[in-house]
Amino acid sequence: MGIEQPARLSLCLAADVPVGTMRRFDVPGAGFVALYNVGGDFYATADTCTHSAASLTEGDLDEDFVICPVHFGMFHVPTGEAQGFPVTEDLRTYAVEVEDGVVYVVTVRDPA
Amino acid sequence: MSVDVNDLIDMDRGRVDRSIFWNDDLYQLELERIFARCWLFVAHESQLSKPGDFVTTWMGEDHVIVVRDRSGVNQVLLNTCPHRGNRVCHAEVGQVRGFVCNYHGWSFGLDGKLRGVYEAPAFERTPGFDMGDIGLKTASVAAYKGLIFATFDPDPPTLEDFLGDFRWYLDVILDNDPDGTEFVGGSIRSVLACNWKIASENFAGDALHAGWTHESAAQALFGQSVPRLSDDPDSFAANVNGHGWEFNLDLVGNAATLGDRQILRYLREREREVTERLGEIRSRMVGSISSANVFPNLSFLPGQNAFRTWHPRGPRTSELQTWVLVNKGMPEELKVAYRKGAMRTFSPSGVFEMDDGENWEYSTQANQGFVTRNQPLYYGLGLGTEIEHPDMPGHVFRGQINDANQRAFYRRWAELLTDPPTAASGR
């Protein structure tokens, strides 16, 4: 692995993910990423729960916490912090930028 | 089983063999052919207002979760993990996203479907393992005017057919107000050392015990005896499909035992409105001296508004759950009055409940004696009193001092016990 190069990729229009909802994207170089709209602020984390292999966007978004649909493990969306058993490993987070109504996620360039 | 159930009851003469309150084989047959087959009351719709709201209860000795799923449909799930059989829900009431088994972390959605397992890769490598095949067993669910019923019969009649014309009577308490009904407060739980049928048949038809068993309680509560009922021309016993309702047309007789004038005022003020809604006869039944049972084990008292189920715990023990039902549109202070009144009368410390429990426990436990349990019991009161009534549906009998509904209860009991289940039942 070389030095990670940041990459900015457009995901969708901000209007596509209303307040209180989340959506999953397949992002080159990052795999599945969950994009959240928490009270008008956008955040992104890995979509796969760090405990089992579930997709977090199939669970619940409760204010700034996402709850896994399988064992109801809970993560803090802005920081990715695991909140307690059965989830013990934090989620990877990604920077999000909104420009002219378009949401971008900042990830790393695919080394290939 | 070698015993012929039809030999145990003789309803043309009014005789019951006491082994039906004692015999373990008969009890197992009841679990299979009555409790795993009949529509059973499991919850009131008012207990489940949002997705994830649940209560747990029993269908016979099968523990079930009644839960509102994400699409707003009420589900009844057998509370046992299909992996090693542990309970997946240990609370009586609450709000959940799903159910996770404590043992190996199998996780189920509000619809009972398996959503995930712990150590998933190992299961995924296993030939033939398919999450879609495995889930919590579900019961069929239907509601009648707020009351949710469920059945494990794989090919059940509709709830409407199961209740039949008894719905005409049920509307007295479930539909006397356009806003419908709700449960107030939680559930009162207690255990009685009696057979479940002794309690159910009492509510189905036993007005006779009221004046005698409850004499001292009546004196203490309102300073007079329960009225003599044997010559009352306006008293009846009615039954449909084994469900029974014995009643008077005195409007407030049961309600008066709650000892609260505002309840009596409420009933009297609403009499005209209820007459317009349900007709004169049913308007006079709303709070009257009466009791009812929906076969097999949902009992209630119009007037006191106590609803209860007698969950069987073997042939000699019953676990009682009691709730208080009120009209949703009723002023808040009246709801409180009904709740307190029901606790004063029909909770474990309630004055009437204590009277009944003592009697029913001895009626059951006396059968410990071999000679005792070989003595038949008399159920002949009111033989020959059936009438045709122009307004009242079902089998109607003149006089609420009558064993007619109890006989109908045991006829239905025998009919179900002698009807073998189809191959799919309970599977």
Image (cartoon, rainbow, N blue to C red):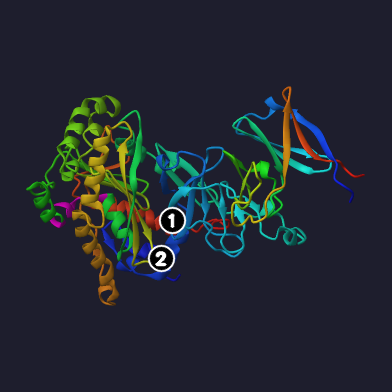
Dot 1 alpha-carbon crowd within 10 angstroms: few under 14, some 14 to 19, many 20 or more: many
Identity, as a three-letter code, of the amino acid under mark 1 = Trp
Task: Determine which quarter of the picture holds residue B84.
Answer: bottom right
Q: Which residues are magenta?
A: B205-213
The percent coordinates of residue A99 (x first, y second) are: 74, 25
Question: In the displayed structure, would residue B223 be above or below residue B281?
Answer: below
Q: Is residue B252 left or right of residue B193?
A: left
Tell me which residue sits at (27%, 24%) in the image: B276
Q: Is residue B401 left or right of residue B172?
A: left
* Residue indicated by mark 2: B27
Disc 1 and disc 2: Cα gap in Å? 16 Å
Q: On the same chain: label 1 and label 2?
A: yes
Residue B58 badge: 1
* Most common SS among magenta residues: helix
Mark 1 / mark 2, whichever is N-terminal: 2
The residue lying furthest to the top in this view is A100
Q: Is residue B109 left or right of residue B390?
A: right
Question: In the displayed structure, would residue B389 be above or below residue B22?
Answer: above
Which of the image's four quarters has the C terminus of chain B?
bottom right
Task: Tell me which chain the residue with mark 1 is part of.
Answer: B
Task: Determine which quarter of the picture holds residue B258.
Answer: top left
Identity, as a three-letter code, of the amino acid under mark 2 = Tyr
The residue lying furthest to the right in this view is A112
Asked if residue B55 can be seen in this view, the reply is no
Identify which residue, B394 or B113, lies in the foreground. Answer: B113
Task: Tell me which chain the residue with mark 2 is part of.
Answer: B
Question: In the displayed structure, would residue B120 be above or below residue B109?
Answer: below
Tell me which residue sits at (39%, 66%) in the image: B314
Tell me which residue sits at (66%, 46%) in the image: A80
Instruction: Name the element at disc 1.
Output: strand
The percent coordinates of residue A35 (x first, y second) are: 70, 37
Residue A73 painted magenta: no
